[in-house]
Amino acid sequence: MLDLFPKEKIILPLPDAVFEYYPNFFTNDEAEALFKKIHDETKWQHDEITIFGKKIAQPRLTCLFGNEGKPYSYSGITMHPNPWNPTLVYIKEKIEAIAQQHFTTVLANLYRNEKDSNGWHADNEKELGRNPIIASVSFGEVRKFQLKHNNNPDAKLTLNLSHGSLLLMKEGSQIHYKHQIPKATQSKKDRINLTFRTIL
């Protein structure tokens, strides 16, 4: 039976948007099992992205899953989804019960070490609509997640995303904020991040 109401929900103290953080969305044992299954079963790919007109190797590995016929494009890449598998459907359904949102796509990211990262950006691609809800699940190594307001320099926050945690970025989050996973100065092991989206 699904635990639809995790014990702890933290509302991040940021204006103009709603961010909900569930640090223990999955138990440690469940997070360990899900991490291993996703890590071993995913056909990870290493794409080139376009930054300021230059092509560079993306500093992480990725794989897209989702509904047939729903590609996803960002930074000069167009990804075509692999079919959903039982592990991802289980995670998706548990998140949907909390978020009250139906997700059509998940981008899996593998951060292999402290050098892998994701620079400042918003998930505001046109196929997501004007004000999307993004669900971000973390497994494995704890990494820093940073948020900053587009116009208010005082509205910023750094959050350590824990193993088995869920971050819901809701209304206003992709309009008023950018976020990133910076490179780390200390050695880091593998981290898997799943970002669930709804492609219109």
Image: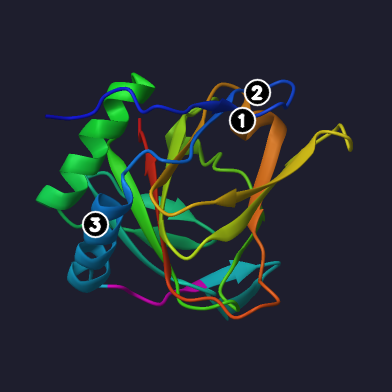
Question: Which residues are drawn in magenta?
Answer: 44-48
Residue 18 percent across, percent down from the top left? 60, 23
User: Where does label 3 land, which residue?
Assistant: 34
Question: How would you rate the neighbour count of disc 2 (Cα within 10 Å): few for under 14, some for 14-19, many for 20 or more?
Answer: some
Judge whether 105 appears above or below 152 on screen.
Answer: below
In which quarter of the view is residue 127 placed? top left
Judge whether 146 appears above or below 51 on screen.
Answer: above
175 within the magenta span: no
Is any atom of residue 134 visible in this view? yes
Q: Residue at x 71, y 67 (%)?
A: 52
Judging depth in this view, the residue of 67 and 11 nearest the camera is 11
* Circle 2: residue type: Ala
* Circle 1: residue type: Ser
Residue 124 percent across, percent down from the top left? 56, 39
Judging depth in this view, the residue of 65 and 169 nearest the camera is 169
- Classify mark 2: helix, strand or loop: loop
Q: Earlier in the sequence, mark 2 or mark 1?
A: 2
Judge whether 130 appears above or below 145 on screen.
Answer: above
